[in-house]
Image: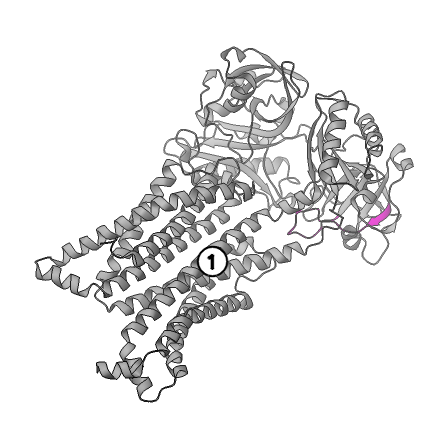
């Protein structure tokens, strides 16, 4: 029966292929980034334990809290870890950059993970002074050690420190974090790091624990809230009243900021499936209108209504199976495209693929869709009315997708107009790790040698060094103070400023203009370093109505620095946030990173302004570093790439919504065309009689266009109502855009109505060409 109606079967399969293909590909992305179960036994009992410091924008577990929060009844042992990068040297090979997770001795026990070879890190390994041991990831074991069992007991070098390989993790293991790790080594924290009141020293960790049988999250929060109160009593200035405890399911913590994006994609998946189902239902309803005699014969031969419905359902299932088969092929193509375009922030560690779970979900969705569009012809309503309802539903969903895409595009355009405050073009940056290299204690020597090499390289315009680079990194966050005013309390809320160490050529190389005063000179770097340059945001906030030049800043027990210059603001706290007050200090040869506040270790960063292709400059920089020391690790990128990464997530969501909105619009317009074509067929005699009685072709065309306008108007009204409620999912992704932006919604509705009315052009022309004489002869 389906083969006898290719005009219905072929479009239905094509619609299903497009709908199921795009929906399956998007669901595979959502599954990889959010829904995939954690690879641990009983993952639903694992929780993340951190403390949130709003003024520092820091979500972490301080090492003294890890040491003193152990042994609660609801959680049992509390494990901790931190992840950084390290230079790994195995045998005689070159150093390779590896993700290194420093873990407590009980982490694998808390996660209930066992090694596939050797043993895991145990509490005895996690003691100060204990020999360094390492557990390899399965991928590193396979790629670097050829999956050799004899790798156990071998010695590798990590940042110049010898470590003994003692085990291999399972193939599916991943750290309970959004960052990957190639190997695990012990934390081995000294007692001074694990207790409050030991000089203020602390390390920033992440915590994970397992709920004990019968325990709940609320009980765990109550117990640890009491522990936090004890920490606050010991360090009231650090644990202010706004500091809060965060105990959340581990899968929710790992998902982090991708949860909103995942919910948006899930809503898109549901919308495209509903639109595809409505479109096919409209096709089948149109077919049912021409099967009246067939159904009458079936009833006359004794078929019951249930058997007729079953027959329709079987036809729908056959269509659904054909659509899913072709949709899976389309999904594979789309997934390859997503793999190329996806930002790392959306799908972090897991590969995107059509797994067994994704396939099972796609088949279940196909069954539901087949049930929906198969039974539409059996509804006890006139077929044309059913098709009109389906088309209005398609138009409403299309408008919601189109309005969401418009809002995201508007946000993207606004973000792209944000000025970085420096020149990103032809700027190459490299983050260097000196650990384990011959420059580990001689950073000044490395800077001099690398600067000389780069200046002799053709195309180099300027070279600079800093401890961290905008737009998102900073070396130190400290409470601001002025030398001519009383000192504020440490960690005073709202007065934290960024401190960045830079050399004399930093501002020129980055293209950061000076507003007043001067920048650093060679004499400043060779001297005591007690000078500072501040940004305009700091000058306006703390020196309003007066000049900051000549004032002394920093303080809190640290030597005062005299302000010698004021620079323009740069985006130093991401793209969406206003520039934060910032102090630049000279990166002198003898300067050590000063304590106080919160410090973040980024090693050493080099910035190169080049006149040649940045790819060529990157290649030459790698060559210089290799010649200087093969154990030097460098993460090299252009500043344009880093700047583009800040909008990568929004670009991905906007691209997905735009693509799906276009597909939905095409389906909806096809539905409008089908309804109006059926209308012309049904009202053919009426049109002929109207024209015989004097109606002009334009009058007849107006009847059809008017019906298209009514359908589009109803869809626009319902879609607008849905948009006003549904765009709350997009609220966190929008930048300086009202999620109820009337212009965006009105523009989307106008485009929808225009396209729907445009789809009526062909049926309207067909209606106006009816021969009145032929119609009267038939009467």
Residue lying at 61% horizontally and 23% vertically, measured from the top left: 189
**Front-most of residues 234 and 371:** 371
Q: Quadrant of residue 230?
A: top right
566 drawn magenta = yes
**Front-most of residues 93 and 227:** 93
Q: Is residue 28 left or right of residue 293?
A: right
Asked if 135 appears above or below 587 in the picture, the reply is above
* Segment tinted magenta in the rendering: 564-581
Residue lying at 34% horizontally and 59% vertically, measured from the top left: 278
Name the residue tied to disc 1: 661
Is residue 587 in sight in this rendering? yes
Q: Is residue 681 left or right of residue 650?
A: left
Residue 245 position, x and y percent, is: 54, 41
Q: Quadrant of residue 297?
A: bottom left
Is residue 556 in sight in this rendering? no
**Front-most of residues 479 and 423:** 423
Question: Farthest residue toward the right?
Answer: 523
Number of other residues with Cα within 10 Å of mark 1, as a class: few under 14, some 14 to 19, many 20 or more: many
Residue lying at 46% horizontally and 41% vertically, measured from the top left: 34
In which quadrant of the rendered image does the C terminus lie? bottom left
């Amino acid at each position: 029966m389906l083969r006898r109606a290719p005009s219905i079967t072929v479009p239905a399969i094509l619609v299903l292929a497009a709908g199921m293909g795009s929906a399956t590909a998007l669901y595979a992305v959502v599954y990889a980034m959010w829904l995939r179960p954690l690879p641990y036994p009983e993952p639903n009992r694992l929780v993340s334990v951190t403390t949130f410091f709003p003024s520092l924008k820091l979500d972490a577990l301080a090492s003294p809290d890890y040491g003193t929060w152990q042994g609660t009844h609801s959680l049992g042992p509390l494990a901790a870890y931190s992840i950084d990068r390290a230079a790994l040297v195995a045998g005689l090979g070159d150093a390779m950059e590896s993700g290194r997770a420093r873990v407590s001795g009980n982490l694998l026990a808390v996660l209930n993970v066992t090694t596939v070879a050797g043993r895991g890190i145990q509490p005895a390994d996690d003691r100060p002074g204990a020999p360094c041991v390492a557990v390899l990831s399965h991928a590193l074991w396979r790629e670097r050690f050829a999956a050799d069992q004899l790798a156990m007991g071998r010695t590798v070098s990590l940042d110049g420190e010898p470590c003994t390989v003692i085990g291999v993790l399972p193939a599916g293991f991943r750290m309970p974090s959004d960052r990957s790790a190639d190997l695990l080594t012990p934390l081995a924290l000294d007692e001074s790091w694990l207790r409050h009141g030991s000089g203020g020293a602390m390390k920033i960790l992440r915590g994970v624990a397992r709920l004990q049988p019968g325990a709940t999250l609320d009980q765990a929060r109550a117990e640890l809230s009491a522990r936090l109160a004890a920490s606050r009593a010991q360090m009231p200035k650090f644990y202010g009243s706004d500091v809060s405890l965060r105990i959340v399911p581990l899968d929710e913590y790992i998902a982090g900021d991708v949860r909103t994006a995942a919910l948006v994609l899930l809503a898109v998946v549901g919308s495209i499936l509903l639109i595809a189902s409505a479109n096919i239902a409209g096709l089948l309803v149109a077919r049912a209108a021409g099967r009246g005699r067939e159904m009458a014969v079936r009833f006359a031969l004794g078929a019951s209504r249930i058997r007729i419905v079953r027959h329709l359902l079987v036809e729908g299932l056959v269509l659904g199976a054909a659509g899913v088969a072709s949709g899976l092929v389309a999904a594979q193509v789309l997934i390859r495209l997503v793999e190329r375009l996806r930002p790392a922030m959306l799908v972090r560690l897991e590969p995107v693929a059509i797994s067994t779970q994704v396939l099972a979900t796609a088949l279940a969705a196909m069954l539901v869709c087949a049930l929906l569009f198969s039974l539409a012809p059996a509804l006890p309503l006139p077929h044309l009315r059913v098709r009109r309802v389906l088309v209005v539903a398609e138009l409403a969903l299309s408008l919601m997708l189109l309005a969401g895409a418009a809002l995201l595009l508007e946000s993207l355009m606004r973000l792209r107009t944000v000025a970085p405050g420096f020149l990103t073009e032809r700027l190459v940056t490299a983050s260097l790790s000196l650990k384990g290299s011959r420059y580990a204690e001689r950073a000044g020597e490395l800077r001099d040698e690398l600067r000389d090499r780069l200046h002799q390289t053709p195309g180099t315009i300027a070279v600079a060094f800093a401890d961290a680079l905008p737009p998102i990194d900073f070396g130190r966050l400290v409470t601001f103070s002025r030398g001519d005013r009383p000192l504020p309390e440490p960690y005073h809320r709202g007065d934290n400023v960024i401190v960045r160490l830079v050399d004399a050529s930093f501002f020129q190389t980055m293209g950061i203009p000076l507003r007043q005063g001067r920048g650093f000179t060679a004499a400043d770097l060779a001297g005591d370093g007690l000078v500072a340059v501040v940004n305009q945001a700091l000058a306006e906030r703390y020196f309003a109505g007066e000049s900051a030049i000549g004032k002394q800043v920093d303080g809190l027990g640290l030597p005062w620095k005299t302000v010698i210059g004021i620079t323009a603001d740069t985006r130093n706290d991401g793209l969406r946030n206003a520039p934060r007050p910032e102090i630049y200090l000279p990166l002198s040869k003898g300067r050590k990173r000063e304590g106080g506040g919160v410090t973040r270790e980024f090693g050493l960063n080099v910035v190169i302004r080049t006149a040649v292709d940045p790819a060529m400059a990157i290649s030459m920089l790698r060559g210089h570093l290799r010649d200087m020391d093969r154990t030097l690790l460098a993460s090299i990128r252009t500043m344009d790439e880093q700047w583009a990464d800040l909008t990568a997530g929004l670009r991905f969501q906007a691209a997905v919504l735009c693509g799906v909105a276009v597909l939905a619009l095409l389906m909806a317009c096809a539905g409008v065309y089908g309804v109006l074509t059926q209308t012309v067929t049904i009202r053919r005699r009426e049109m002929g009689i109207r024209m015989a009685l004097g109606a002009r072709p334009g009058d007849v065309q107006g009847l059809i266009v008017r019906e298209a306008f009514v359908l589009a108007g109803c869809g626009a009204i319902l879609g607008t109502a849905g948009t006003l409620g549904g765009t709350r999912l997009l609220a966190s992704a929008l930048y300086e855009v009202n999620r109820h932006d009337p212009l965006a919604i009105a523009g989307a509705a106008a485009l929808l109505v225009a396209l729907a009315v445009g789809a009526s052009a062909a049926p309207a022309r067909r209606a106006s060409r009816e021969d009145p004489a032929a119609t009267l002869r038939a009467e």
